[in-house]
Amino acid sequence: MTNQQTNDSSNPDPTRPMSKNIGIVWFRQDLRIADNPALHAACAACDAIICLFIDDPCDQTVSQLGAASRVWLHHSLESLNQSLQSRGTELKIAQGDPIEILQQLSATYSANRLFWNRCYDPATIKRDKKIKTALAALSPESFNASLNAEPWETVKADGTPYRVFTPFWRMRAKSLPGTKPLSTPKAIAAAPDTKKRDNLFLHSIDSLALLPEKDWHLGMMSYWKVGEKSAMASLKRFLKNSVHFYANERNIPSVSGTSGLSPHLHFGEISPRQIMHVLTQHKGTLTGLNTDEETFAKEVIWREFAYTLLYHFPQTIKKPLDKRFEKFPWAKNQQKNLRAWQQGMTGVPIVDAGMRELYATGWMHNRVRMVVASYLIKNLLIPWQSGEQWFRDTLVDADLASNVMGWQWAAGSGADAAPYFRIFNPVLQGEKFDSAGEYVRLWVPELTDMPNKFIHKPWELDATERQKFDYPSPLVDLKESRQRALTAFDTIKQPANTE
């Protein structure tokens, strides 16, 4: 059958225009056009596309995260819109319940297809299942855009989820780097607008009011470049300049030894598949990586381990995986010490430096994240949920899965967690990883002139000399509070229950 015959059979009346497939691509935490499975599928299946972002009131969705993340989201949406405009379309912005918006949108545009990339938190999974049922007429399709493998695929031979990272890594490494990233569409045909259709959308990204009224965010964003192009540039710069020292320098908070990709990954400005392929492009497989490169690859898969845990144990967003900790005797009257911790005024320099870095930049060095978490949970006996909530509000990379897993790890209550009795000594951590006090002096400038010997323990300085520094005394004695934590743990120390 010739092409002409095919066209005639599909459109027997040449005076009547052929019907078109109009698809909706619903962007969520996949704010890029390269290696975007939903966008790629829509371009292949549809004649015209509506690119959409919904400010969704559902808890745990990307637009409902903390203030710092909302600032990043604003700029990321602007970057995505510029990319789309350069290919012939634009990002439409809507606000409200997704089912209602998608139903109205499909009716107004005569759209007959719907595409999105999956999220893995329990609230979004529940909502997406409801949408697939309600909008079955649109033949909705969802895709994996944020992980190298699905959480339900990365299980043990008996079908149960991994709870320890090392065997999880060994299993995942066998299939990496995986399939090649999808190509970037050169052009995207936009569905034509009318005045009636325009009324479905907000006028601009500014209409979402993601930016705060006070301009505190300007200082924070001066540390970052947002968007898909910046994400790939950061990856290539890191692999060229820093990855060769990664195994050691990732622990030194005063140097730029990490990739800085976590917020880009969180918002989907870059995919883990892209990272793996750029990392291995000259090696072919993971077996060709050196120690530093493999350590970096493990960090990428550690994030996927977090998603696997979140998917299989959704209750861990709020509750400890180890149920013993539901009865843990936390300190009473926590608010004063919690506030001091949040403000970086605990009197422990490495802790305060980390908390001030977080407030100023929306990010904190990972080694220091472990130290400040251990201090909050074990020295102050404040529940990990309080720390997780503060991080969720102040981090630009407030990834729900990674954040929850990290805090449960520090608390000793999660999968593959540090034992509760492993209590980070912030003085020793500071002396080991910030020996000259460069990191502390950067973020706690009142200690600039503190002698190196006392930079991580200023309370040991002679009282007369100490008065010269406008810096608070420690909230608690480190040795006594450590023993208090161990005594508290003894009250729940029976065989672990994670069922």
Image: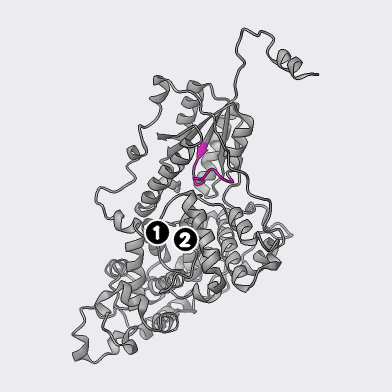
Indicate left or right for 278 with 175 as reference: left
Kindly identify the residue that appears in the image at 36 percent across and 64 percent down. Answer: 358
Q: Position of residue 71 (x, y in %)?
A: 36, 50
Q: Main secondary structure of the magenta part?
A: loop
| Element marked by disc 1 | loop
The answer to whether residue 145 of the structure is visible from this angle is yes
Label 1 with label 2: CB-CB less than 8 Å? yes
Q: Amino acid at mark 1?
A: Leu
Which quadrant, please, contains the C terminus? bottom right
Q: Secondary structure at mark 2?
A: helix
User: Residue at 63% across / 45% down in the picture?
Assistant: 182
Q: Is residue 447 above or below residue 98?
A: below
Q: Is residue 128 left or right of residue 180?
A: left
Foreground of the two, 182 or 343: 182
Q: Is residue 326 left or right of residue 464?
A: right
Q: In the image, is residue 30 part of the stretch drawn in magenta?
A: yes
Q: Residues within 10 Å of mark 1 (few under 14, many from 20)?
A: many
Going from N to C along the chain, the mark reached first, 1 or 2, is: 1
- Give the magenta range: 26-35
Between the C-alphas of marks 1 and 2, the distance is 10 Å
Question: Residue at left 43%, top 81%?
Answer: 429
Q: Amino acid at mark 2?
A: Asn
Picture coordinates of residue 435, whole percent (x, y): 40, 84
Residue position for label 2:
403
